[in-house]
Every structure is written in structure tokens, then in C-alpha cells.
Image (cartoon, helix red, strand yellow):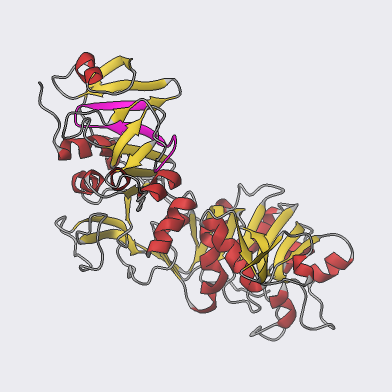
Amino acid sequence: MPQKLDELSMALRVASELQPGQVVALGSGLPARVAEVAPPRTPLQLLSDGGALGYCPSTAGLAAVGPSLTGPDGVPVALAEGGSVVGIADWAAMLRGGHVDVAVVQPARVTASGDLIGWTTAATPGLFAPGRTVDLAAGARKVIAMLPHTGSDGSPNVLADSSPVADGRECVEIIVTDIAVVRVEEGGLVLAEVAPGWSYDDVAALTGASLSCADNLKEIAPSLEALNAEPPGKVYPDAPSAIRDIADGATVMIDGFGGPGGMAHYLLVSLRDQGTRGLTIISNTIGIARSVNFGTPPGKLAIDHSILVDNGQVAKAIATYPVSPSMSNPSSFELAYRRGEVELELVPQGTLAERLRAGGAGIYAFYTPTGVGTLIAEGKESRVIDGKEYILEEGLRADYCLIRGHKADTMGNIVYKGTSRNFNAVMAPSAGITIVEVDEVVEPGQLDPELIVTPGIYVDRLIIRPRDFSPYE
């Protein structure tokens, strides 16, 4: 019998499936070894439920953060330049919210339809012990299964039939074993590569499912050359270039918290000047800063959502504070609403924050007691749970998000300052494209990873506010 691949050779083959800039969640066991073979300072963001985003082995020449920051196997790791520290809720939200490109898992068995049975589930007959496997299987855009081709008793680990108990259904795209690379396709399993010295017949004899042979069957010879390329940059030269593709009818999240602090004024002005119309704006406030004038210099007006409303660009707002606290000084949105020019969906402030968080975390809807018995509850599903009434609220997502940070690195990691942290941080994961206006951009590694609030995986574009730009006009 020809020699099988060792664990590091398997890890190299898995790593050759990855692309620069991808976020890759690694499971325990064999997948943890992928971190050992990735090139130093590779443009990958490895994610571990041990608290690390953007990590490498602590032997890679970078400083380890300590035993509290670990890889998926509980072994201390080091943060790479641009890495950040995350909690388990963040890890799960990144997966559910669609922010992870690839998950690598070691199941006990894989089926021809792409189902996987985790080793913890397989090791506890009669029980279901999913651990992290269900999250990894359900959350990533692409799932790679990495496992021995056969068990210790010689029985196949790649099977034809689905199991009544599975940790993931029809999720695996690629199976990398110690003798082969198998692709899960609509028509069944396709043998794409074999370990040196192995043939199709050898692999088929050890596979518990029908296996077709690729026309260009080749020997496993992994290359990591693609990982040497630089991912596309996130820093744009100016705000107009960063928002150029926002089209008519788009839904845009914009922070707002009464005063001018925390708003992406430079981006707002650029969006006004671009003239994009029919916008749905999601914001805590919708033009209140200009009405209340908190901290506004005499003779000036704060730049806020009002400049879009006054320019006829807003069709609808989803907001908490759509009107001015002063009856004698109504907001532009309030006046437009009275004229019937805009629509409004009112949301309590805490519910808005939770709807944003849910949208970014892949939670479609949730029940809350907030608003029961008020106008907020009209037309919404309600349930009595444990003797208390709750209403159903749906998560919010947007096409774009225009937010304000204080400092960023070129990978998109964001540090906030003061009021800018409130709604900006919760909006960032909830948009298809997140654009952040900051005062300064530094190189990866120059931000304290413990102070990063918004990891760069949520940020698509960065622009620096010009030093002479004023948030007032």
C-alpha cells in the first residue's frame, strides 16, 4: 500500500485552497495545523473560538498575547500584525452573519451529499454533541472537510448514505484526506487528486460511496504561491470615490446621536453632492443635530442627515428620533414627512440597536417586550412567553454603511473615540459594504489589538477626513 500523507502535507493541501484576504475559521484537530503551514505574515485572517482573529503559531517570531489567547486546540497563539481579540459571541456572529469565507473542520465522517458528522457526535452514540462544528458547518461560505480517509479499523470515513444525526447538511464542498482530494458536486463525489503513488482504484476501494474520476486526475502537489499576492487595498483617496457606486434606491446606515459627534460628515457631504436619490436611511436620529445645535458654533449649522433630506434624496427613514425636541425648530425630515414626501418606520432606540446587531450576526428575527401595547406593536406578531407578552422584530441589514471612526489600520480595524462608538460599531457588520471615515490610517500592528472595536473583516473601504474639513456649514 502506498504511503499516506502526513498531517502537515494535508494542511498544505488545504491551505492551497485559500485566497489572500480571506477569513478562515479553523476547527480543532487536523484543521489547527493549517496555521502552521501558512506563510509568515500571510494575508489571511485565521479565526479561532479561543479569542483570536488574525493569528499564527507563537513560534512564528511574533509575540504571544498569553495563555488566554488560544487556537482551536487550546494552544497559545500569537496575533499577527493587524490581528484582534474577539469573544465567543463575536466568533459566532462572524460565522452566522456570513463574514467567514472558509471553515475547515475535522469530521468523523462525510457523506456523498456533503453532510458531515462531527467527531464529538460520532464518539457519543445516542447523544448529539455538536460543540463548534454546527456553527462552522452552517456559517462559512465554503466548508472544507479534513480527515483520514479511513478509521483506525480500516472502515471508510467517506460514506454514501446520510446519517440521521449530522452536524451539517449538504455543506461540505471539498474533502481533503490522507490519500485524496474529493470534490462534492451535484452529481456525486468526484476524485480530483490522489496522494503520490495512489491510483483511482486504490482510493475507490477505501471509499464507502460511488466515486467518479475527474478527467484531469492529478497527484497532490500543493502550492501556496497564490497566498503571496496582496489582497485589494481598502484605503480610498477620497470620499467621492468611496461612495461612487451607491445607486438610487439604496439602503444606507448612517450614525446619529443628537449632536454632531460620531457622524461621517465628509461622506455625507459627498453623498449629497453625488445626488443619489430614493434612499432609505437607517439611523438613530434623522437630522436632529441640525435642530438641537449641541456644540454648534454660532452662525453655523451642523452637517447631518438633513442635507440629504433637503436635497430630496431620502424616500424613507428607519429611525428612533425622527423629529426635533423643539416644536419651534422642526427637523427637515419632520417637515418632509408632514408634506407626505417621505416614509417613516419608528423603532425604539434599544430595539434599533438589537435589530442592527441581529442583522450583522445572521439572526433573522427575535422577540422583545419593548413596545408591547404601544403603536410600535401594531401589525407585528406577538407571543406570550412565560406569562409575558413579546413582539417579533426583524434584523436589519443595508446595502451600505457610512460610519465614523477615530483611527484605522490599512486592514480596516477600527478604534473609536467618544460618542462615535455608539451606533457606528453595531452598524459596521450589518451592511453589504461598510465605508468608514477616520482621522488617521496606520500600518497593521500599530493599533492595540485589545482596543480594536470593529475588526477589519467588517470594513470594506476607508477614507481619511481632510484636516481642514469642517462638520459645520
Image quadrant in which you'd find residue 225: top left
- Tell me residue 231's x, y (percent): 37, 45
Q: Is residue 240 above or below residue 112?
A: below
Q: Position of residue 286 (x, y in %)?
A: 71, 69
Residue 241 falls within the magenta-colored stretch: no
Total count of labels = 0
- Does the magenta-highlighted stretch encompass residue 171? yes
Tell me the quadrant of the picture where the N terminus can be found: top left
Nearest the eye: 64 or 464? 64
Above or below 465: residue 93: above
**x and y percent of residue 204 in the render?**
25, 18
Residue 465 in view in this figure? no
Residue drawn 33% across and 33% down? 110
Q: Is residue 245 above or below residue 366?
A: above
- The answer to whether residue 181 is visible is yes
Residue 48 lies, in percent from the top left, at 31, 56
Task: Magenta stretch: give its range.
Answer: 167-183
Position of residue 412 relative to residue 121, above or below, is: below
Q: Nearer the viewer, residue 392 or 408?
A: 392
Indicate the quadrant where residue 39 lies.
top left
- Residue furthest to the right in view is 339
- Residue in the image at 26% along x and 23% along y: 207
In the image, is 73 to the left or to the right of 293? left
Is residue 242 left or right of 369 when viewed as pictured?
left
Where's the C terminus, which quadrant? bottom right
